[in-house]
Image (cartoon, rainbow, N blue to C red):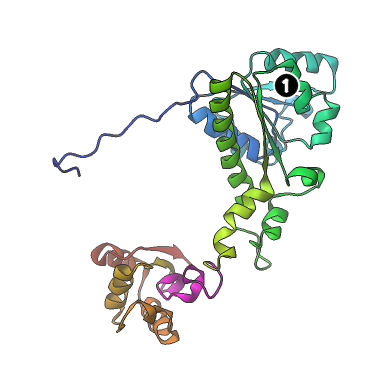
Amino acid sequence: MTAAGLAPVSLKPLKPLRGTRVLSLALNLPGPAALMRLKAMGATCIKAEPPGKGGGSGDPMGQYNPPAYATLHEGIKVIRIDLKTEKGQAALHRQLARTDLLITSFRPSALRKLGLGWQALHRLYPALSVVAIVGAPGSRAEEPGHDLTYLAEAGLVTGLDLPATLFADMGGALMACEAALQAVLVQKSTGKGCFQEVALSRAADWLALPRSWGLTQSTGAVGGAHAGYRVYPCRGGRVAVAALEPHFSAALCAAAGVQIDGPMDLFKPTTHQAIAKFFASRTRPQLNLLAVSQDVPLHTLPA
């Protein structure tokens, strides 16, 4: 509630890219995910993809996960263009002639073979900007790789289990959106397009910074060393508790009947053991009620 006792008014989403035309040749996940967000910011978005078998999508995502493909491309015009044919090249350049921003996800050598290298495009369309999504930056852009290999290189694959989501791909999509916004600002101020490379490996490196600082290492406060920031078993499931700040830690310990003299006691093995014992004795509904009544940040999960 506001100071006047009224609920805040829900603001309409901003559309800063209204009037901007974006053409994407990027397949799989990072490019389409970026395009989805650019559309949400008001851009007019077109996706050009190769023709698939039987008239279907030529994007691998459209073949191995149609629901995800449908969500990514909702409200986005998809056109079929075979870039290896003269007809396809002509269709592409008709689109480029009225495009503000082009998104690609090919290796640089493949783009040059298609006549879509930055120098060639900039010569033909001086106001066109390009965001090139690659696996690794610079001279490594020709190397094969995928989300998993970039996360592994960044130190974010710590066991034999696969990561819970495609962090590098989705982080790369956000970085591509950031690059797109920068390109639009440059174009508006100079009238000229610019080229920006977005590497998925750099997205993984960015996401890995907290780990490189030690925050999420086993000795770090959010890596398991702090008893108030962990996942514990409880009756009928698990509980993710994030009582990191001193007032949250104090509330958790008070609810659990654990005596502490200060915040650093949350790093002691005895505190870990006492809180683990408390959670093991409580059901998920009991802990959900505790979260509300004692203002403890936690979320229960099935076993």
Q: Quadrant of the N terminus?
A: top left
Q: Is 179 located above or below residue 301 in the figure?
A: above
Where residue 131 appears, as percent x and y from the top left, is 66, 32
Q: Is 207 located above or below residue 239 in the figure?
A: above
> What residue is disc 1 on?
122
Where residue 137 appears, as percent x and y from the top left, is 73, 45
Span of residues in magenta: 216-236
Residue under the point 28% across and 65% down: 289
Where residue 293 appears, as percent x and y from the top left, is 24, 65
Q: Is 93 in front, or is 291?
A: 93
Where residue 165 appears, as percent x and y from the top left, is 59, 53
Q: How many neighbours does mark 1 have within 10 angstroms: few (below 14), some (14-19), or many (20 or more)?
A: some
Residue under the point 56% across and 41% down: 174
Q: Quadrant of residue 104?
A: top right
Q: Quadrant of residue 29?
A: top right
The kind of residue on which mark 1 rests is His
